Image (tube, helix red, strand yellow):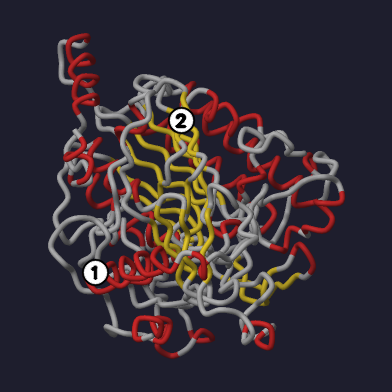
Amino acid sequence: MNKLIKNRGLLLSLGSLAVFSSCAQQQPQEAKKPNIVFIFADDMGYGDVSALNENSKIKTTNIDRIANEGVIFTDAHSSSSVSTPSRYSVLTGRYNWRSDLKSGVLMGYNKALIAPDRRTIASVLKDQGYQTACIGKWHLGWDWNNIEAGPDRVDFSKPISNGPTTRGFDYFYGIIASLDMAPYVYVENDMPTALPDRVTVNDGMKYWRKGPTASDFDHEQTLPNFINRAVDYIHDKSKEDKPFYLYLPLPAPHTPILPIKEYQGKSGLNPYGDFVLMVDDMVGKVMKALKDAGVDDNTILVFSTDNGCSPQAKFDELQEKGHYPSYIYRGHKADLFDGGHRIPCVVRWPAQIKPHTISQTVCLTDFFATFAAVADYQLKDSEGEDSYNILPLLLNEKESNVIREATVHHSINGDFTIRKGEWKLLLSPGSGGWSFPRPGTDDDVIKTLPLVQLYNMKDDPAETKNVYAEHPEIVKELKELMIKYVKEGRSTPGVPQKNDGPEVWKQLSWIEE
């Protein structure tokens, strides 16, 4: 069994095989594969979920229900501490820095990031008989018509190209990027649903950049709009014999922070707290739809987030009232510190999962291999290079052997950290992001610091004491492992692959040190 896990568990575990066999005995016909709904919130912290934070001032009733009736991952992480890279990793099972995007995020007019020949979990599931849909925030680029002439010359009356429908999704409805990134246009499948008829802009917590806005676009109603369409999709597809995969990347609680009227003031904290409550209620609507459609029992429902909470939430206001979006962890969105990439992750599947908690490290990339295993698909060496099958962790109440060898995280600046067991090595003297000491802002401080940071996450989860000098052997081990992951183009067992773009880029300067 251990050997099976070490090889990513590309086949179902013995436990899962037994479960599916049992289901088959109960049903004369072949058991229907489970539906999969992946709810992906935006800029929501680990400490925002009351099931994960006993001191949370926000009661996330519906997310808590997923947690209490399923699996809670207490050490789950995004591959990056910002948006585009995390989404790339969810859909490809590959670390984002292996793509052409070595730092930062895409903006609203950037072209498609996922290469045309790169398999996504949507294309895998589609080939395995699933109906596939993405409703919400894409943020992986596509090609607007006439974009070569410049953003001001885009023809919104013409179809887009290289969008979600070319990356494995049968159906798409959503927006190009974050809700604060122009242009503000809904796209259904490959066509904008309406033409821009005005230019809008906003500031403060309701911030969005100036840009063309379609006649049917309302920032405040975008989240409810996506949820209503997701509910309709669930009801429609539940009537069919084929299972469905619904990827539901929410635009919230990212800026603009826009709780609708019924949620304003509800948290007793600030608009961000109100917005989190609204997100939780939207999760509840999805859960109700699954129940009403009669598919709740055999649906894998995942709730997670793309990275930690953003400073736009106004930490000072929240902390004054005793709420800590990063919980006990240092940092926030954009950072190498755990507050940047330790995320809520809960999974519910009533037919197969009994409630339990998993404390070992997992990564969002792992859902690629896991969903592939659920669909009886064995990954090729060129697919899901950083994805481990965590299905055994979902199905078995007793925690199994450690599945991941190590986990790599990436900051907005493109800096690296690698975690193995209790040890975490930051290949950067600072945060790599927006926390102090911030590159570009606090360089005078950064110049006085060691080039690397080593923390024992068991003894020091808040990353307060850099112990690199006391453990040079650990620094050496983790650095060598990181170099191996870079050079082999994968972190899972298999044939080495090639990273996209140059073999060496500026954020890898530590390789030669």
Asked if one can make out residue 386 in the rendered structure from this viewpoint, the answer is: yes
- Looking at the picture, how far across and down is residue 72, in whole percent? 50, 33
Residue at left 41%, top 77%?
102
Residue hosting label 1: 489
Q: Tell me which residue sits at (46%, 66%) in the image.
A: 417
- Circles 1 and 2, Cβ within 8 Å, touching? The answer is no
Q: Judge whether 444 appears above or below 93 on screen.
A: below
Amino acid type, mark 2: Val
Q: Nearer the viewer, residue 405 or 434?
A: 405
Q: Amino acid under label 1?
A: Gly
Q: Nearer the viewer, residue 495 or 196?
A: 495
State the mark number for residue 71. 2
Residue 147's place in the image compared with 254, above or below, is below
**Sequence-first tag of 1 and 2:** 2
- C-alpha gap between disc 1 and disc 2: 31 Å
The x, y position of residue 396, in whole percent, is: 34, 25
Query: Residue 361's spot in the image, x, y percent?
Result: 42, 46
Judged left or right of residue 57, residue 132 is left
**Image quadrant in which you'd find residue 335:** bottom right
Does residue 161 appear in the picture of this structure? no
**Tag 1 secondary structure:** loop
Q: Position of residue 79 (x, y in %)?
A: 43, 59
Image position of 58 with respect to 467: above or below: above
The N terminus sits in image quarter: top left
* Most foreground residue, 106 or 512: 512
Residue at (59, 66) in percent of width and height: 214
Left of 423 or right of it: where is 401? left
Q: Secondary structure at mark 2?
A: strand
Q: Mark 2 packing: few (<14 Cα in 10 Å), some, or many (20+)? A: many
